[in-house]
Amino acid sequence: MKFIYLLLAFLFFVSCKGLFKKEKNNWEPPIFPSPPAQPRVQFLYSFSSSAEIVGKRSGFIEYVVGKEPENPIDKPYGITVHKNKIYISDSMLPGLEIVDLSNKTFRYFAPGGLGKFKKPLNCALDSLDRLYVVDAGRRQIVVFDKDLKYMGAVNSGKNYKPTDIALYKGRVWVCDLGQHRIEVRDQKTLKVIKTFPETDNNSEDYLYSPTNIALYGDEIYVTDTGDTRVKVYDLDGKYIRSIGSFGKRAGHFVRPKGIALDRDGNVFVVDAAFENVQIFNNTGKILMYFGGGLPAKGYMSLPATVDIDYENLDYFKKYLIDGFKLKYLIFVINQYGSGKVSVYGFVEPENKKQLGQHLNSLYLGRK
């Protein structure tokens, strides 16, 4: 009897086709920019359900132990990668999908009681693995401990409408769409320390519709969707400059949303109208873009947010095209389409001599 159980376990293992098995076919992943330019971003993988993470059972295994339920990602908006886990805020669930890359698991997190979600948009985790969820339906920030037990929730009045959150230097930075400002809270007490900007809509630093936020160095980057640009402030809330403007060319925006920065200070901005991600250096110069709204794998369908990760490269290296190495991962959320979570890689040639004549014009670390 013991032998039969061992055999079934072995068959289950070898029959699963998920994230850790590379399919053999003639499909070639999209690369950006397209040849003859030097590739900088490559599409690696995408998933929209648990089956693409944990794998599907073979017909024989389904006959013996039953069919594995396939849990879909419904309408995601936010994404954050923390250690070896991916947290996806799903407003339709409503709740979070949590993907554990090391254990190859997929689970829903939709608590009841005091922690029940209404419309979770974005989330962040601190060094103690506490989870902070921005819930636009509750108009609150809801906090859970490392075991996902409810700890509490905070808001700032009836006009409060949080949309995004970032944890940085002992502070909680929140986009408050309802009151056109950034709210800064103490991470330990969650009490409000300050808000900014305190100006009217005649000022260049005014936030019409602050939707997403990211921090780098001593600067705060806020996507102002209502003003079709990214606005940059210092840590005291003083306005510094803006990135992009309304228009139809590269470097312009129509509906900017999610934002993230790499370790070189390059700024990645999602545009839901262009259905792409544009990359700027930290002075606001456009460097390149990737994605686009083509109905094909590796492109985008109403993208919302972006996150950058340097820790989980080993899980995706096998998807690289020959001759390149992976510098970091770029995760993009699509609210529609077959690839709700798309994973791209920032790539560079294994042999630096391959850079050739494109090095000076396309190297993103160059200022």
Image (cartoon, rainbow, N blue to C red):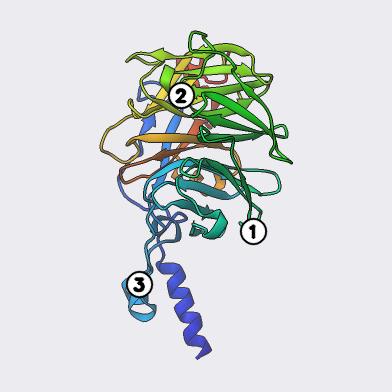
* Label 1 environment density (alpha carbons within 10 Å; few <14, some 14–19, many ≥20): few
Q: Is residue 303 left or right of residue 4?
A: left
Instruction: Please count the marks in the image.
Output: 3
Q: Which residue is mark 3?
A: 67
Observer-side mark, 1 or 2, equals: 2
Indicate which label's residue lies in the foreground, 3 or 2.
Answer: 2
Q: Residue 76, position in %: x, y?
A: 41, 44
Residue drawn at x 56%, y 35% is 157
Describe residue 241's horizontal placement relative to residue 322 as left or right. right
Give the left or right position of residue 82, taking residue 296 as reference. right
Separation (CA) of disc 1 from disc 3: 29 Å
User: SS class of the residue under badge 3?
Assistant: loop
- Helix, strand or loop status at disc 1: loop
Neighbor class of circle 3 (other Cα within 10 Å; few <14, some 14-19, many 20+) is few
Residue bearing mark 1: 147
Residue 293: percent from left, percent from top: 29, 31
Q: Quadrant of the C terminus?
A: top right
Q: Nearer the viewer, residue 234 or 135?
A: 135
Depicted 84 relative to depicted 285: above or below = below
- Counting residues from the start of the chain, the first of labels 3 and 2 encountered is 3
User: Which residue is nearer to you in this view: 256 or 15?
Assistant: 256
Give the foreground label among 1 and 3: 1
Q: Residue at x 41, y 53 (%)?
A: 93
Q: Disc 2 on helix, strand or loop?
A: loop
Residue at 53 percent across and 34 percent down: it is 160
- Name the residue carrying label 2: 209
What's under tag 2, amino acid-wise? Ser
Q: 20 above or below 79?
A: below
Crowding at label 2, few (<14), some or many (≥20) Cα neighbours within 10 Å?
many
